[in-house]
Image (cartoon, rainbow, N blue to C red):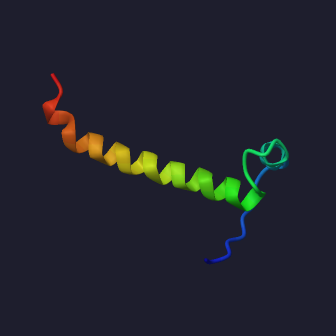
Amino acid sequence: MERVTLRIPKQQIEEVEEMVELGKYPNRSEAIRSAVREMLEEQTDSKSNENRNWAKV
C-alpha cells in the first residue's frame, strides 16, 4: 500500500474522527479509503449508465 499525503480542512477531519470514535471505522485511514472506494464505484457506475442511455425510453 502506498502512502499519500493530503491536506483536508480541519472540520472534515473532525467529522471523520467522530465517525471513528462512534465505531463506524477503525481509524481515519480506513474511513478515507472507504470514501475513495465509494467515489471510484460511483464513477464506474456513472460510466456504465452513460453506455446504457440508448435503452432509456
- Residue 48: x %, y % from top left: 28, 46
Q: In which quadrant of the rendered view does residue 26 lie?
A: bottom right
Q: Is residue 42 above or below residue 1?
A: above
- Residue 52: x %, y % from top left: 20, 39
| Residue sitting at the far bottom | 2
Q: Quadrant of the C terminus?
A: top left
| Residue sitting at the far top | 57
Q: Name the residue rendered at 62%, 77% in the picture.
A: 2
Q: Is residue 12 left or right of residue 34?
A: right
- Residue 16: x %, y % from top left: 77, 47
Q: Name the residue rendered at 21%, 44% in the picture.
A: 51
Q: How many marks?
A: 0
Between 4 and 23, the one lying in front of the other is: 23
Q: In which quadrant of the rendered view does residue 7 lie?
A: bottom right
Q: Name the residue rendered at 68%, 59% in the picture.
A: 30
Q: Name the residue rendered at 61%, 53% in the picture.
A: 34
Q: In which quadrant of the rendered view does residue 28 lie?
A: bottom right
- Residue 35: x %, y % from top left: 60, 50
Q: Quadrant of the N terminus?
A: bottom right
